[in-house]
Image (spheres, grey):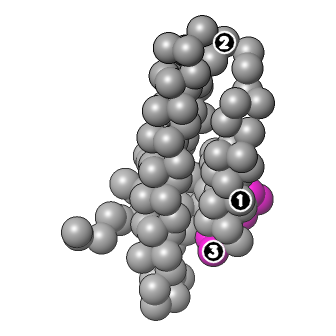
């Protein structure tokens, strides 16, 4: 897999909230069904915030990725953020799958 640049990663982090909301649509207001996954996603975003020196919210991570000068990245940081973005995507897919299964059981 090729390494995404900061602007691509910013788009990915900026879309997390929308993607989570879409994944959770079948749950209505039953967030408890995916509470562990939501906690896991929050931890991933906090870790990304730590890497890019921002707060641990997706929008702040995206802002930091977009505004940080290219020559200020340390070796491996972009790759680390890319791995975190991939993990976040996996968690969102898990949320969607669990939401669908839960909706089918109703």
Q: Which residue is mark 3?
A: 51
Mark 1, secondary structure of its residue = helix
Residue positioned 50% across, 42% down in the render: 94
Foreground residue among 39 and 50: 39
Task: Name the N-terminal-most of marks 2 and 3.
Answer: 2
Quadrant in which the N terminus appears: bottom left
Q: State the image quarter where residue 31 is shown.
A: top right
Within the magenta stretch, is there residue 38? no
Q: Is residue 10 visible?
A: no
Mark 2, secondary structure of its residue = loop
Q: Rate crowding at label 3 as few (under 14), some (14 to 19) or many (20 or more) other CA atoms within 10 Å.
A: some
Q: Which residue is mark 1?
A: 43
Q: State the image quarter where residue 48 is shown.
A: bottom right
Kindly identify which numbered label has been placed on residue 28.
2
Relative image position of residue 81 (x, y in whole percent): 50, 69
In 3D space, how far apart are the residues under numbered discs 1 and 2 (Cα atoms)? 23 Å
Q: Is residue 75 visible?
A: yes
Q: Nearer the viewer, mark 1 or mark 3?
A: 1
Task: Confirm or deny contact between disc 1 and disc 3 (CB under 8 A).
Answer: no
Task: Name the N-terminal-most of marks 1 and 3.
Answer: 1
Q: Nearer the viewer, mark 1 or mark 2?
A: 2
Region rendered in magenta: 51-56
The residue at the far left in this view is 1
The residue at the far front in this view is 105
In 3D space, how far apart are the residues under numbered discs 1 and 3 (Cα atoms)? 12 Å
Question: Left or right: 47 with respect to 13?
Answer: right
Quadrant in which the C terminus appears: top right
Residue positioned 64% across, 51% down in the render: 41
Question: Left or right: 70 with respect to 14?
Answer: left
């Amino acid at each position: 897999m090729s390494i995404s640049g900061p602007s691509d990663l910013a788009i990915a982090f900026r879309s997390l909230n929308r993607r989570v909301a879409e994944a959770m649509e079948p749950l209505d207001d039953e967030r408890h069904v995916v509470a562990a996954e939501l906690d896991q996603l929050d931890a991933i975003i906090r870790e990304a915030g730590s890497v890019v020196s921002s707060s641990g919210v997706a929008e702040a991570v995206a802002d930091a990725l977009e505004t940080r000068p290219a020559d200020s990245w340390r070796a491996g940081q972009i790759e680390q953020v890319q791995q975190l973005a991939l993990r976040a995507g996996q968690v969102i897919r898990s949320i969607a799958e669990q939401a669908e299964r839960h909706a089918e059981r109703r």
